[in-house]
Image (cartoon, rainbow, N blue to C red):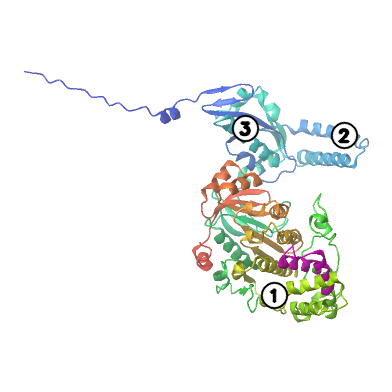
Amino acid sequence: MKSKKTEIKKSVFPINDNLQNIISPSGISYDSTHTEVGENYGKIYTITRYNPYRDYGWLAPLCNIEGTATTIEYRRTDPGKLIEIFNRSINEKKGEQGSLKNESDKQINQQEINDLKKMIERLAVQHEPVGYVNIMLHVQSDTVKGLNDRIKRVSSVVAVNGCNMTLLKKRQGQALRAIAPYGIPIADAEKIGQRNMPVATFFGGFPMAAPGINDEYGYYLGKTKDNHVVILDMWKRDADRVNSNWFITGIPGVGKSTFLKNLFTCEFAYGTRIIIFDPEEEYKDLTKHPDINGDIINASGGERGRINPLQIRKAAVVRKEDLDEGELFSDFYDYGEADTTSDMALYIQQLKTFFKLYFGKEEFTAGISATLEQNLIELYNEKNIHWDTDITTLKNTDYPIVSELYEKIKKKSEDPELSAYKRDNYEKLVDLLFSAGQGADSFLWNGPTTLESDADFVDLVISSLLEADDRVKRAQFYNIITWAWNELSKDRQQKVLFGVDEGYLVVDPDYPDLMKYIRNMSKRLRKYEGGLMFITHSVVDVLDPAVKRFGQAIIDSACYKFIMGTDGKNLKETQDLFTLSEKEVRILERKRRGQGILFAGSVRLTLDVDVCDKKLAMFGKAGGR
């Protein structure tokens, strides 16, 4: 019989390099300044100085840095030795106090004495446990260039939080063993960074102490990436939240409108009055909802939307106490200090800006400006309005209107005794004022102010202005915003929120006056119960060199910022402006609807906006959902 040979078949699979790398031990090496773990280059630093004024959750920024592993060690110790050291330090500093000559040095020295006394009280009187804390940061990247870039960002985060970090030179190997999962304490590496710290300060700094925002009188906005709630009270005042201003950006389609409508609705429910500069009619559905029952006003020339530009209103000035260190009045005004009590004087300056926007700066010469100012003063005096008049006692019908100014100047232009120079200015001014006084633009401005509302939700629709001549558009935008300031500032007890949507529309590099006025508003609003929300597509919109100093001030003065999805040049500008981490950049790159980076004072976190279906039904479809 023939035997059958069984053929054995062997299956051969290709080697999976990725899987092999995962299950194979990583190669580890180091020198005096670097580490190499697998394919990653790294450096290990230690924190050598801490901010003496630490809030709850102060460790959170140090524990959540992109591409960085943080190791924290804490060893309790006997407070007796520390108390002895502190007592000796106090005596030494008291001895130095008399020899210091500069007042600044004396105050710094005295503050250090006070801090040491507080520490002794905590340790000796309150018997608070104390120990030594050591924090090491292992910064890593897959390339040397990437590592250097990441170290710069880590240094910025550490510096912003009032700390210093030092590279552990010639101790990278020891530090690597200390921060490894098995954690071998190395005294030589620890002693460089260890600093004494009360146990309450240490535990109060852990990230879980400040997982989100939970203001006592706030409302729910959404959740963080770690699923912690964000309950925000934008009227809260503390060390780093000194106003209620917002700066909000995001390209179309990322959920900006939904976030804004939700915020406005929550504020309305909490008793805040809402006024919206609405170029795209996005808030009409919300305003007319039965639960809101607000006012929709056509501010582009509707029957109820006229604002008489000659009606004197409070100006959004900046006072001496509003100037930050290094700022001058010349940074804000072209005509010297604004610290005056004459509403008429300030408003005439404001009117000159209005007419410059309307006439065009080429036409608004020194001669035209002087002639206009002279006739405005005379016209106000004829109406029994003078430098010291209390404008709060006047009605809308007490003010002159544009046609009266036009007729006055026209009549004067016919005076045969005028010099050739003055006649030329008068005749030009007649031509420039004709459209506003008697022509096509008179429907906007010629007549007493009719734009009045006592509603708590006011939607100023300006959509039909978008097709108007640039001169008319600029002047009316200015007119509306000055009216809004009057509403914001007339009652210091009333919370009022003014939202400037599509903010890029008020940015004109050739005419920065609008941005200057809004910047002035943002400066003054902290003195009132008012808040400014400046909403635009990108930071690039407000950082044109001609308006940058105003746009930058609007951004910087806002305690609250919500930066939503973006890309391209704007993403780069946003990253540089707000010093975003790689993780935050990736969040913005994804352009996920309803997600962005929220800044609330010194707190910054990733926010996923959460809006219930009932609210979404209120918002309508304008602006998207």
Residue 123 in view of the camera:
yes
Crowd class of label 1 (few under 14; some 14 to 19; many from 20; radius 10 Å): some
Question: Which numbered disc covers residue 148?
Answer: 3
User: Which of the two labelled residues, at mark 2 and mark 3, occupies the earlier sequence position?
Assistant: 2
User: Which of the two labelled residues, at mark 1 and mark 2, occupies the earlier sequence position?
Assistant: 2
Q: How many marks?
A: 3
Q: Is residue 362 magenta?
A: yes
The amino acid sitting under disc 1 is Ser
Rendered-image quadrant of the N terminus = top left
The amino acid sitting under disc 2 is Asn
Real-space Cα distance between discs 2 and 3? 44 Å
Residue 324: give x, y in percent of width and height.
79, 52
Crowd class of label 2 (few under 14; some 14 to 19; many from 20; radius 10 Å): few
- The residue under label 1 is 435
- The residue under label 2 is 91
The amino acid sitting under disc 3 is Asn
**Pointer 1 with pointer 2, Cβ within 8 A:** no
Q: Is residue 96 magenta?
A: no
Observer-nearest of 369 and 145: 369
Observer-nearest of 99 and 459: 459
Q: In this picture, which residue range is highlighted in magenta?
A: 348-375
